[in-house]
Amino acid sequence: MLEGHQPLEETRQGEATVVQGPGASGRKLYLESYGCQMNFSDSEIVASILADAGFQTTREADDADLVLLNTCAIRDNAEQRVRNRLVHFKANKRKNPSLVVGVLGCMAERLRDKLLEEEKLVDLVVGPDAYRDLPNLVGQVEGGQKAVNVLLSREETYAEISPVRLDKGGVTAFISIMRGCDNMCSFCVVPFTRGRERSRDPQSIVQEAQELFDQGYREVTLLGQNVDSYKWNIDNKGVVKDDKQPVVRFAELLELVAAVNPDLRVRFSTSHPKDMTDDVLHAMSRHKNVCKYIHLPVQSGHSDMLKRMNRGYTREWYLDRIDAIRRIMPDCAISTDIITGFCGETEEEHQATLSLMDEVRYDMAFMFKYSERPKTLAERKYEDDIPEELKGSRLQEVIARQMVHGKERTQALVGQVHRVLIEGTSKKRDDEFFGRTTHNTVVVFPKGDLKPGQYVNVRTTDCSAVTLKGEVTDELAQS
């Protein structure tokens, strides 16, 4: 999973999103994606690979010849939702014996034997680095075999594959800039399910951004488990691989993508506190189209807890990074991830998290109870010893604190004029559009003669806890 990630996280952890790709002749593919933004991006790669093999994507599972669930293993409830869906599709196979059902992504390697042999819920299991093998694996299933490929790769980035954009005519899109993770946070299963870090050729990223802009997209989000560790043409020891090619780190990549077009907004996810440099912050400040929003997961506000989590920084280091953001970009919005009830969490450590929240005053946060995951360092080294009731009560305290801070941050934006990218029709009213500010705050306003993909200036007049309301204006935007 990406550590957190920004709304489109209405669909975040564990909720299914059904996606539809472009028309093609032949068999039909039905895709469901669970979890983080990386999974949604991966589904577009899968759709592209299978389109070349003659599959047309469909929104109707009953019409499909091939059903694939792109899964998340970060929390137990996500896995349970996937299992429930697989049971449903197993029942469908009784009516349609030729239906092929498969699991992709982060659950694949960990549960392959159980899903294939013990519970007989799926026909194929494919890991995040084996999507190119999907046409061959589907052929094996159609030949009467079960099919598995969960091998991890040190090289695979799918750089030259042009993803099928599953929201045809959309406004925002994801670009995967790297895969895998080298951070061994003790609570996290991602390094075991997605492998080691490797970065894409920057020119392929810039080309994809240009193609998206030419197709009408007006915002891209650069994705990586830890975008701050993006590097091209340099190894982990700092040795340049090719003297004839430039070294590109994340700050330089941001500048390259921002230069595609001033009307192409650029976001990214996710930053890691131990790796985020001032160079990145200065690059953000130099370009108006790089959104002034940073998701900086803290997880806990106590240094002892951060050490048990193997996060690689202290409370003081984290707050120094917050100070750097505020100094270089005073108007930048900041969100975070917080885990309550991790192994051995004391009341003092919990209170330290609350006090850090008071000091930072996040615009938004993704807050969770600790859920032990198999194969992690925490499972091997620590006891999951905090009672569920206490985990829950501490989580409620964290949520209550964030609700206060979030509402304060949203209210402070009322009365200002914001440049907003129109994304679509409001969920609550058909006569209103919604879009987001550079700070990632949602704004709703009357439709008028406008259309998605346009930029408008909106004077905000009111707000709920996390959403601004306003009217389109000819006044210059303040942000």
Image (cartoon, rainbow, N blue to C red):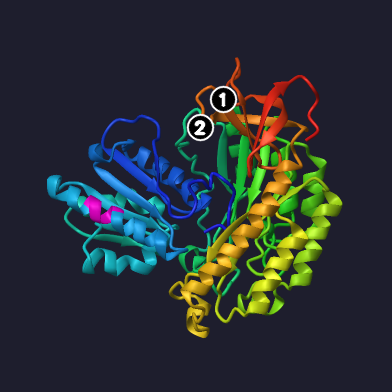
* x, y percent for residue 377: 52, 78
Q: Amino acid at mark 1?
A: Glu
Where on the picture, by quarter, is residue 278? bottom right
Quarter that holds the C terminus: top right
Q: Is residue 355 above or below residue 69?
A: below
Q: Residue at x 82, y 49 (%)?
A: 282
Q: Amino acid at mark 2?
A: Lys
Task: Tell me how far mark 1 sits from mark 2, CA to CA.
Answer: 8 Å
Q: Nearer the viewer, residue 49 or 61?
A: 61
Q: Look at the image and give the residue range highlighted in magenta.
A: 85-89
Residue 387 screen position, x and y as percent: 48, 77
Determine the secondary structure under disc 2: loop
The secondary element bearing badge 1 is classed as: strand
> From where the camera sits, is residue 416 visible?
yes
| 86 part of magenta stretch | yes
Labels 1 & 2 near each other (Cβ < 8 A): yes
Q: Which disc is residue 432 wearing?
A: 1
Specify the quadrant of the image occupied by residue 127: bottom left
Indicate whether residue 444 is drawn in magenta.
Answer: no
Asked where in the image residue 44 lies, by quadrant, the reply is: top left
Left/right of residue 336 with respect to residue 326 in the rendered view: left
Disc 2 marks which residue?
A: 428
Q: Is residue 428 left or right of residue 264?
A: left
> Residue placed at 19% from the left, 47% from the top?
92
* Residue nearer the viewer, 55 or 275: 275
Please tell me whether residue 342 is drawn above or below residue 211 in the rendered image.
Answer: below
Q: How many marks?
A: 2
What percent of the width, then of the height, locates residue 405?
70, 53
Q: Which mark is residue 65?
A: none
| Residue in view at x 38 percent, y 61 percent | 79
